[in-house]
Image: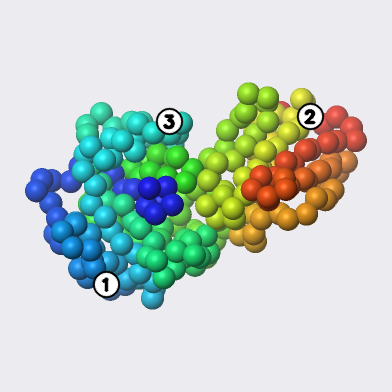
């Protein structure tokens, strides 16, 4: 499901409900064209927006409960719903799936999710590649600037967590660039300072592609150095922060 159906919208959808009952706002109807899916006997619709096609897939309460029970799912500005919710996921069509990490495709996917979520009064969404469960209002606020051409919304599409060894790591960056990051820093670096650096590098990789070669670069403040070492297959990159003198980063 993670790669085929990356985004799941959760809502208290009345029963019975079919995707053919979906009522878009006038604004959404002007830019989204809904047609029956090629799949027979399945509750799916084909959505065209911005010249790109996506499939909307209806999910039962049992299916959404499985997604909510996924190991390691992180809740962002929401909690696990008390009431059982059903949902609608968005699948990228085969003709554009190879470019799923492309900024234009990603922006369009998120724009579609916003309109569909608003039409069903969504409670939250799950971004499957990063295992993030996100409150819908926060999700909409976080993607608005990006949809309008702003920076990549790292915090709603890439998870960041600490490893048992005290490093920081990403989850979900591989959806966009085929690569995840592990970052280490001096012990006097506050966690939020390490995360700030990790977010900026994750943004760069998601936007410009993965790091292919080992390098040593200036860091984000004077006297700071980043040692960057991708593994042999490029699927992970180790980034070590070193500093020539101690900085009070608290």
Real-space Cα separation, disc 2 to disc 1, in angstroms: 52 Å
Front residue of this view, candidates 63 and 197: 63
Q: Is residue 200 above or below residue 32?
A: above
Q: Residue furthest bottom?
A: 51
**In this view, the mark in front (2 or 3):** 3
Front residue of this view, candidates 222 and 50: 50
Residue 33 tag number: 1
Front residue of this view, candidates 105 and 4: 4
What residue sits right under mark 3 in the picture? 71
The quadrant of the picture occupied by the C terminus is top right
Q: Is residue 21 visible?
A: yes
Which residue occupies 80% across, 50% down?
Answer: 214
Q: Is residue 85 visible?
A: no
Q: Position of residue 192 (x, y in %)?
A: 64, 33
Q: Give the image quarter of residue 164.
A: top right
Q: Is residue 3 above or below residue 45?
A: above
Q: Residue furthest left?
A: 16
Q: Position of residue 123 (x, y in %)?
A: 29, 42
Tag 1's secondary structure?
strand
**In this view, the mark in front (1 or 3):** 3
């Amino acid at each position: 499901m993670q790669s085929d159906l990356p985004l799941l919208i959760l809502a208290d959808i009345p029963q019975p409900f079919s995707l053919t009952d979906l009522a878009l706002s006038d604004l959404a109807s002007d830019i989204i064209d809904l047609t029956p899916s090629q799949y027979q006997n399945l509750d799916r619709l084909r959505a065209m927006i911005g010249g790109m096609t996506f499939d909307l897939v209806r999910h039962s309460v049992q299916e959404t409960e499985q997604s909510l029970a996924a190991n390691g799912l992180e809740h962002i500005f929401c909690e696990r719903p008390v009431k059982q919710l059903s949902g609608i996921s968005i699948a990228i069509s085969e003709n554009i799936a190879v470019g799923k990490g492309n900024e234009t495709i990603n922006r369009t996917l998120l724009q579609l999710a916003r309109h569909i979520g608003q039409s069903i009064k969504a409670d939250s969404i799950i971004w499957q590649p990063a295992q993030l469960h996100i409150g819908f209002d926060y999700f909409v606020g976080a993607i608005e600037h990006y949809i309008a051409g702003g920076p990549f919304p790292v915090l709603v599409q890439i998870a960041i967590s600490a490893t048992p060894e005290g490093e920081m790591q990403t989850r979900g960056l591989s959806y966009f660039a085929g690569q995840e990051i592990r970052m280490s820093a001096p012990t006097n670096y506050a966690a939020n300072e390490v995360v700030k650096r990790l977010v900026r590098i994750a943004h760069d990789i998601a936007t410009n592609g993965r790091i292919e070669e080992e390098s040593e670069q200036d860091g984000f403040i004077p006297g700071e150095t980043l040692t960057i070492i991708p593994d042999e297959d490029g699927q992970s990159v180790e980034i070590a922060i070193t500093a020539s003198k101690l900085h009070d980063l608290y």
